[in-house]
Amino acid sequence: MDITWRGVFTSDEVNLLHAEAFGTRLFDVSEWDWRRLVADHSLGWVTARDVTARDVTARDVTARDVTARDVTARDVTARNVTVGDTGRLVGFVNVVWDGLVHAWLQDVMVAADARHLGIGRQIVAAARDGARAAGCEWLHVDFDDDLASFYLDACGFRPTQAGLLQL
């Protein structure tokens, strides 16, 4: 497994992983351009690549249970998702910040067939290390109740009170 701070990725790869991780439809790059988003708003990001999965094609990707989440084989094939020598993207986290001392984890994602292998913990640790190296003093994360054990126990976050306002 290759865990990399500011690792190389394509927007198509992250869109595919996002659809699988969050159960959304597969967005097109014209709708959700991850490379532009991280360039404009992020301190950094972390990629996790399964380097044993070389030369993976869209056909191989559809063999996973991606279609169960409104992602069709046609969608994946149309985007020509290929991996080549870098390995398949199995994890990603975006790290946004205030430009000073606060950073936030956004969109922590791990492929379904790569979960419960410690990849999520590793990408969060790499995000923590990257934020610390940039001079951040605090790393924040919001999560649903079912992920409390992961963030609090496995990753070392402490519970806080926070507010949320839907706009």
Image (cartoon, rainbow, N blue to C red):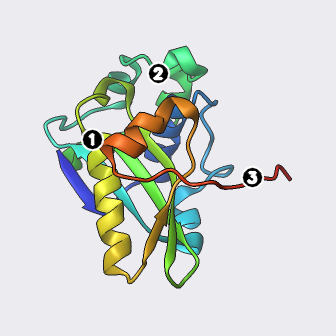
Query: Helix, strand, or loop for circle 2?
Result: loop
Residue at image coords 35%, 58%: 46
3D distance between C-alphas at marks 1 and 2? 19 Å
- Amino acid, disc 1: Ile
Q: Residue furthest right?
A: 167
In the rendered view of the protein, which quadrant contains the N terminus?
A: top left
Left or right: where 110 falls relative to 121 = right
**For the residue carrying disc 1, how many other residues have a C-alpha within 10 Å: few (<14), some (14-19), or many (20+)?**
many
Reading the image, the residue beneath label 3 is 164
> Could you tell which of marks 1 and 3 lies nearer the N-terminus?
1
Nearer mark to the viewer, of 3 and 2: 3
Residue at image coords 75%, 52%: 164
Residue 66 circle label: 2
**For the residue carrying disc 2, how many other residues have a C-alpha within 10 Å: few (<14), some (14-19), or many (20+)?**
many
- Amino acid, disc 2: Val
- Residue 109, how many percent across, how many down? 44, 41
Foreground: 51 or 154? 154
- Residue 40, how many percent across, how many down? 59, 73
Reading the image, the residue beneath label 1 is 119
Residue at image coords 58%, 27%: 23
> Could you tell which of marks 1 and 2 lies nearer the N-terminus?
2
3D distance between C-alphas at marks 3 and 2? 30 Å
- Residue 20, how many percent across, how many down? 49, 29
Residue at image coords 82%, 49%: 166
Nearer mark to the viewer, of 1 and 2: 1
3D distance between C-alphas at marks 1 and 3? 28 Å
